[in-house]
Amino acid sequence: MNMPETLRPLTMALSKGRIFEETLPLLKAAGIEISEHPEQSRKLIIATSNPALRLIIVRASDVPTYVEYGAADLGIAGKDVLLEHAAQHPGGLYQPIDLNIARCRLSVAVRKGFDYDAAVKQGARLRVATKYTQAAREHFAAKGVHVDLIKLYGSMELAPLVGLADAIVDLVSTGNTLKANDLVAVEDIMPISSRLVVNRAALKTRHAELQPLLDAFEQASRARAAA
Ligand code: PRT
Ligand code: MG
């Protein structure tokens, strides 16, 4: 049984790890403290100092789904995740604010010694392993490069090392993971950061509760970008 809309606190979906850690200061700037930390408590529903707001902890790639279906009113997700979600559910989410957190870039990487530019110039058909099939498909199509995309769910860095793929499309932040696996980035596809996403119905039905929170996030992320 669902609680009546007016009784349910606003629900915000976050993933554990870097997004959660980088969101905490933004919540703090909005005057919101959390009751417990998900790394310590294992709880999936976390109360905040604001009785009208609770957090739920979900997989990063599930955040858009919770928000689109209204199980969460808002959430925070990386542009990488949002692009893949939008391919299946175009226009499903309102994305008002780039929070500029959890920044990295989406890049093409190959084994050290693999001449990517020459392969592209020769018009070779490349095998590319990635979790980000949508972004990868668009990137190579725009370049006019023929690729066979191989969908993976993690550890993309392994694929070129064991002959599964010629190249990978993956997120890179420090570059340490590529380096540790004798890979090099050969092309940047786009910069990635995390955005606030809002359920389209909640935007209307719970506007009065949502707006102050959106304003606070906007302000906190602007202050952060200026710092
Ligand atoms: O880990 P899990 O499978 O549960 O889910 P997830 O990987 O989607 O979640 P999480 O928490 O790891 O990432 C959440 C979001 O953080 C992503 O959707 C990105 O928008 C953003 N982000 C920022 C990153 C990175 N930086 C990042 N470096 N996500 C992943 N990585 C990985 C990358 O895939 C690679 O394996 O870190 C490795 C590279 O890091 P460097 O520092 O070695 O270059
Ligand atoms: Mg991860």
Image: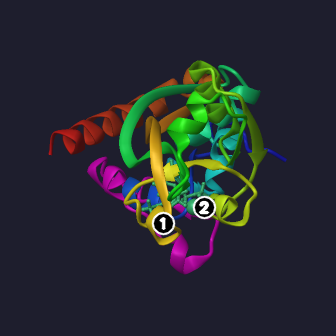
Measuring from the top left, give residue 172's x and y in whole percent.
46, 53
In the figure, 105 relative to 51: above or below? above
Residue 45 location (% of width, % of height): 62, 62
Task: Look at the image and tell me whether residue 76 can be seen.
Answer: no
Q: Position of residue 71 (x, y in %)?
A: 70, 42
Instruction: Determine the residue positioned at 34% across, 31% down.
Output: 215
Q: Is mark 1 within 8 Å of ligand 1?
A: yes
Q: Label 1, on which residue?
A: 177
Tell me if residue 29 is in the magenta stretch.
yes
**Mark 1 falls on what kind of element?**
helix
Q: Which mark is residue 157?
A: 2
Horizontal side of residue 212 vs 62, given as left or right: left
> At x 62% / y 23%, what residue is drawn?
200
Q: Toward which corner of the image does residue 188 lie, by quadrant?
A: top left
Disc 2 residue: CB within 8 Å of ligand 1: yes
Q: Residue furthest left?
A: 227
Magenta segment boundaries in residue numbering: 24-51
Residue type at mark 1 is: Thr
- Residue most toward the bottom? 40
Res 66 seen here: yes
**Mark 2 or mark 1, earlier in chain:** 2
Quadrant observed for ligand 2 in the rendered image: bottom right
